[in-house]
Image (cartoon, grey):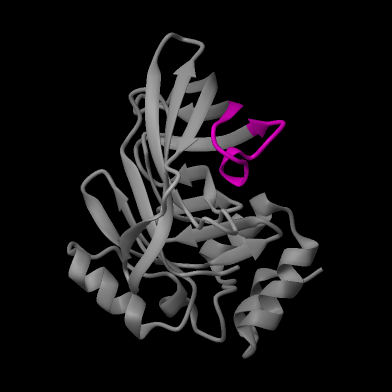
Amino acid sequence: MPDATQCRGSRDRLRAVSSCVRALSLGAVLVMALGGCASSGPTPLATSLQALWPSDADAKREAAELPYASLVVRLENVQGLLVLGAKAGNNTLWPSAEGTVLSLHDGALHALAGSNQALLGSTYHDTLPWRQASPAHFRLARHWRDAEGFVHRGEAEGMMRCEETPEPISLPLGERRLERCEVALSWASGASTEATWWRDPDSRALWAVRETPWPDGPSLSWQVARHWW
């Protein structure tokens, strides 16, 4: 079983991480991503763990310069570029140099760590709604930790409705015609949250997301710069 030292010492980073991903669970891959395994190509860790910059222009410039899968992410008032750190099946990890880690499943939010609040995991029951025709009804369960350190579990009934005609959306590396999908979540607690997904009209892959992940949670959004699929 490969360890972090082997991953860090390999000149071929992509081959080393592919070996790591096959042997490790997603939780272990998260530790490896922060400790030295990168799956974004033959690049040192300093390149794959990008700092968050204060301006949108800086993030887009860095995305254009780097030939690796990347996202422009905004968490509350902090914005910057994240480069793919590790990939295991449909799960991807996007770490920042400051310690924030975004975890996506099939391109949608799964977990978020590094702030005073954290999303510990997400489970879609029965279906991945962004892959379905509109309208789509779905159920979602999430675990999160609040700013006081208490862990919560919430379940929600969701409804996704998408516009029939794709619209041109400005992304970090150019414009793309995408379907806009509005998502309403009704939580068992009585709270409600909303999200907006922009997806490819043919593949239904998510290219941009804006959402509040849980009731009273932080605002989160991202756009795909260079895709990984």
Closer to the camera, 131 or 20? Answer: 131
> How far across and down, in percent of the image, does residue 50 sit?
37, 70
Q: Quadrant of residue 229?
A: bottom right
> How far across and down, in percent of the image, does residue 117 sit?
38, 35
Closer to the camera, 67 or 22? Answer: 67
Residue found at x 57% / y 37%: 121
> How far across and down, in percent of the image, does residue 133 sit?
60, 40
Task: Tell which residue pokes out farthest to the top in this image.
Answer: 190
Residue found at x 36% / y 24%: 148
Closer to the camera, 111 or 169? Answer: 169
Closer to the camera, 171 or 119? Answer: 171
Q: How many marks are shown on the rendered structure?
A: 0
Residue found at x 43% / y 26%: 184
Q: Is residue 11 above or below residue 165?
A: below
Q: Which residues are magenta?
A: 124-139
Q: Is residue 180 above or below residue 41?
A: above
> How far across and down, in percent of the image, does residue 150 sit?
45, 22
Task: Tell which residue pokes out farthest to the front in this image.
Answer: 165
Q: Say whether residue 177 is magenta.
A: no
Q: Is residue 13 above or below residue 3?
A: below
Q: Is residue 216 left or right of residue 32?
A: left
Q: Say whether residue 127 is magenta.
A: yes
The quadrant of the picture occupied by the N terminus is bottom right
Residue found at x 70% / y 82%: 15
